[in-house]
Image: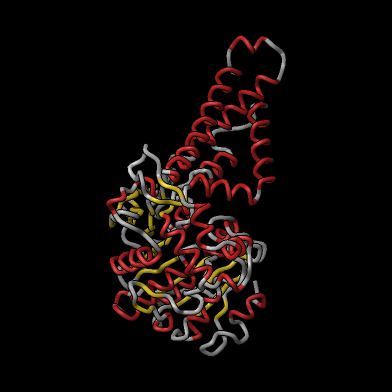
Amino acid sequence: MKGIVSYDALETIRNTNEWLGATTRAFASYPTFALIPNPMFRVLSAWGSVVERSFSRMVVKPDWEIPPIAGEDGQDHIVYVEPELRRPFGDLVRFRVARRNPMPRKVLLVAPMSGHYATLLRSTVTSLLPDCDVYVTDWHNARDIPVSKGKFDIEDYTGYLVDFIRHLGPDTNVIAVCQPAPLALAATAILAEEDPKSQPRALILIGGPVDPDAAATEVTDFGNRLTMGQLEHLAIQSVGFKYAGAGRMVYPGLAQLTSFIAMNAETHVKAFADKVLADARGEGSESDKHNRFYDEYLAVMDMTAEFYLSTVERIFKNLEIAENRFTVHGKQVDIGKISDVAIMTVEGAEDDISAPGQCVAALKLCTGVPAAKKVQHLEEGAGHYGIFAGKSWRLNIRPLVLDFIDENMGRPHRRRAGLRPIDSGKDGTGPGGPADTHKMAI
């Protein structure tokens, strides 16, 4: 009951702030006030509008809104978002481009389950669609999943990835972004041992915590400062009465959002103050940069308690993936069994979530993969978001990823600066290996 009370308290705070914003906007926009030559009313109206929009976005799943793809025939091809496989905790979604033949490249984007919806990868999907058939793991909000559907932890997550990759077939190229990188590695290892014909052709890991201890960040330090009992007491709540998942234990999206904002509070305060003043001057717009970013950033989802806690305990605290000790349903997952899959890692030099060294550790674990099929890229000047959705992704990383996929499909390509094979033995620690990431030619 305590968990439900605190969960509903968060929802009440959100709902009240949304109401205050709407009320302030309506009051300050009263036509008679236009006769008073005081900018206060414009500022109040703008403040109310920004507050109302911000708090209302927190409980709404954003639409994909993928723009049409320009075809070689000069026509625009509409993109349809269609479920390929439906599961209680997440679907495999296909982006079908109307009137277009299947593309040679097939890509599965594994979206993170870390507080935001899969639509966080909207720009990544949009950038890949002209050149690839794209599928995405679309995880569901835990508050909307009835307790009767059972649990969902990192072992279940890994099982979903195994099923999705097996369904798409061996020509699939998997791109795992951030949190799912270690679990995508584990899923590939399971297929390598149990169903080699279903292995993906290439596995690209972007900014993921394969070995969180390789480079400490505020995220990893937080997990190590608290015991699991403390973390469960502080973070876990029970879904409130207004949602289908009432009674399910979760790490609430609103609690996560509070943590996200606190990490860069000064930056967010300035961004909102600038937006209010811009709207008051009549310089803001519905689709300006602020709204585009925060409509996505503020849209948060709940994670099941067992997924959140098992991620912290097994990936961050016990380092089960980093030390190749991960088990699924009691069976050891040996990452060294991967031998026929090309592995690429991408890191951002300024990443404060998964710092350089955490993701490239995957190459050392893949002892069965030939050195020629293991490559890495360190993007100078790029933060966490930039390596999969920002300028660095569009200009530098995306071309490298497509070239890597083409190389392992036997298609014509050109090796670009910044992408270099591992020139070492099986341990991956020689020149160009994980211990030498900063010597890359960017």
Front one among 163 and 157: 157
Instruction: Say left or right for 138 vs 426.
Output: left
Instruction: Say left or right for 187 vs 373.
Output: left
Residue under the point 59% across and 40% down: 290
| x, y percent for residue 33 | 64, 12
Residue 424 position by quadrant: bottom right
| x, y percent for residue 131 | 43, 61
Front one among 172 and 434: 434
- Which residue is at the far bottom? 425
Task: Identify the image quadrant of the C terminus.
Answer: bottom right
Instruction: Say left or right for 228 vs 246.
Output: right
Residue under the point 51% across and 72% down: 318
Residue 5 position by quadrant: top left
Count how many numbered circles sit on residues in the image.
0
Instruction: Say left or right for 113 vs 147.
Output: right
| x, y percent for residue 321 | 47, 74
| x, y percent for residue 232 | 49, 56
Q: How is the image coloured?
A: secondary structure
Residue 412 showing in the rendered view: yes
Task: Identify the image quadrant of the N terminus.
Answer: top left
Is residue 276 positioned above or below 320 on the image? above
Front one among 236 and 152: 236
Residue under the point 57% across and 23% down: 25
Is residue 31 positioned above or below 150 on the image? above
Front one among 3 and 109: 3
Residue 396 showing in the rendered view: no
